[in-house]
Every structure is written in C-alpha cells, then in structure tokens.
Amino acid sequence: MTTLTLSILLTTFLRLCSQNPTHSWTLLPNILVLEVNSSSGTHPLSCLQEAPGGDHQSQEIIWRKDGEEEEQRGNVYLVQLKKSLGGGNYSCHSREGSLLNYTLVLIQEKGIMGRILVRNDQEDYIKCSAQNYNGHFHCSWSWHPNRVSRVAFIKAWRVSNDGQCSVDKGVQRWTCPSGSTTFVCTVEQSGDRISCVDQGHCPYSEETQRISVSVYVVTQHFLLENYSKRFHLFDIVKPDKVSVSQVNSTMIQWSYPPSWSSPSSYFPLRFQVAQLRRGCSGCDDPCADFRPAKTRRVQTTETCHLKVWNKAKTVCVRATDALCNSQWSEWSHVRLRRHKKNKKVKHHPSRQAE
C-alpha cells in the first residue's frame, strides 16, 4: 500500500469521525454504549491497540458482526449507525481465525425513553419498597409486552455515582461502593425485580442522603435504556401484613410484623381497624352499597387488643409508620366466630293437651 493510499484512507477516516453524531461511553469492559440521534453516522472500533510505529491497519484482520463475517478489513472497523440500528456483537479475528478482540455495542437513543418499560399507576417506570429500615429494599417494573428484554447493568449509590460497580454475571449481582458504604443488588429470577441492600446503613441514625438506583435494560436488538429512581427509605417503607387473631367472641388482638424494625418503641406503627358487618366484603372499600363500615384508629407500641362491635362479622387491620407518611401495609382480616345462643323449644298447645 502506497503512502498516498494511506493518506487518503486516513483523511477519509478522520472526515467520517468528525461527522460522527454519537457520544460513546463504556458500561463494562468490552461493552460500548453509543448515544445516537436521528442522524446517520459511523463510529470506529479498534481491534488491536496501536503500538508506536506500528501499522495494524495493513494487517489482514477479519471482522464479524453477530457471528457473520463483514466486508470491512483492518484494525479499525466503522460501525454504521442509523437511528437505533448498529448495535451488536463485534469481534475481530486473525487471518487464521483466532479471536483477537471483541466489543458489545449497545445503542441508546438521545431523548427517547419508555420503549422497554411501561409506566405504572403512579406514572413511574420503577417502583421501590422496603419492609423496614434495615437497609434492604426492592425495586420492580413491567416490561413492554412487545419487546424481549433483560437487565444489562445496575448501579446504586448515596453520595456519588463515580464508583465503579463490579458484577458477578453468573448470578446477575452488582456490587457498588459509595462513600463509606457499599450497595449490593441482585436480579431476582423473575427478571422484573431487584433486591438491594445498603450494607453500611444504620437504621438508628438520621437518613440525610437519598438512595439513587439506575437500572439499564437492553432488548434483543441491542437497544439500551436507563431508568432511575431516588428516595429515602422512609419514602418507600411499607410494613408487612400484621398478624391478627380472635381472642374470644368480643375481643381481637394483633401484633407487629416479624420483619419490622425493632425495638417497636423506636419504630412505632399506627394501626387502622375496620369492622365489617354481615353482607360487607373487601377491606379497602367495605360496604360500598350500604352504610360505611365502623372504623377505629389506634396507636400503640405493644401488642394491641380491641373489643369488637357486636354486629361485626369481619375485622380488618393494617399498619403504617407512625412517624412519617409511609405506605399502608396490606390488610389482614379475621372472620369472627360468634357463639350461638341455644334456642328455646316452643311447646304446641295441642300436644300439651295430649
């Protein structure tokens, strides 16, 4: 190859790169994210790192995309981009077929989101909740029904998101250092939910900094989207269902959920009790066709007792954090067993005469 030919190729390459409408960043080693707009363009991939005075471009390097051999040759491959197209598994090989390097290219469209996940009733893409203040929390989402997708990356932090997360791909677990603490997040088997823990969180100290969670999801066509959520634990805490039982015909009792933070004197719960009469069903909207059910609110840090209304047939109990505006737990309910009174036998006058 002549010097003139090399000069022409270099000029063409620089011109194409200068027209490149992308911004690139590395998600993980060998995983490149290209942020693209609606314009067409190219992005260069290098096979071998150029050594001083080296000339890898003249070598017979073969490129493959998703296993299929490409026409382009040489150390630099130009990824052809058009809107959301261009992502894939790119690998370069020697003339003999040996693997030299590989790059997974993911495409992230600028200013576009909501093609992979679906908003929930609260108009959020991700919903997070915690059973207590021990540093554990869960986040879930709903996949778009027309896209086959999976979690590509997870990041969680409090102070700064500059820390490098490590990943155990075998179990899809991410470990993210953040200041004086470390977050560990694992994708659950369902694929639409993660479990995380702030390993340095102290439930007895004031929570001054919010938790940030970013979930990167990718489709089978290599389209990447990032969804984020920020919260304090007291914003998302939702107690588990309380345990409620009937003591006798006029008394019920309930207790704190075993998963709730202790001691209860430091983490008090507020309870709501709904007493339903015959013909009523459903704790959330009882007696929709009749008079409102009798309701009583109590607050205590000990096991709770309540004398029930003599017309009540079912009692529902739920709990919320007494010190902040947290979510209510799901309802627990018990159907009351009333002792039947013995009916008096009426004697017929005609039989008495016999």
Image (cartoon, rainbow, N blue to C red):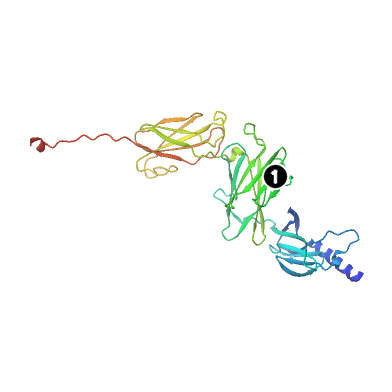
Q: Position of residue 138 (x, y in %)?
A: 59, 45
Label 1 secondary element: strand
Q: How many marks?
A: 1
Residue 180 location (% of width, % of height)? 72, 37
Residue drawn 36% across the image and 31% down it? 250
Q: Is residue 307 above or below residue 192?
A: above
Q: Quadrant of residue 143?
A: bottom right
Residue at screen point 42% across, 35% down = 245
Residue that badge 1 annotates: 176
Q: Viewer-proximal residue, 162 or 342?
A: 342
Residue 285 percent coordinates (x, y): 43, 43
Disc 1 marks a residue whose amino acid type is Cys
Q: Residue furthest left?
A: 354
Count residues near mark 1 (Cα–Cα under 10 Å), then give few for <14, some for 14-19, many for 20+: many
Given residues 214 and 257, the one toward you in this image is: 257
Horizontal side, residue 352 vs residue 272: left or right: left
Q: Is residue 36 visible?
A: no
Q: Is residue 66 above or below residue 199?
A: below
Is residue 86 rendered to the left or right of residue 17? left
Residue 303, compared with residue 222, is above or below; it is: above
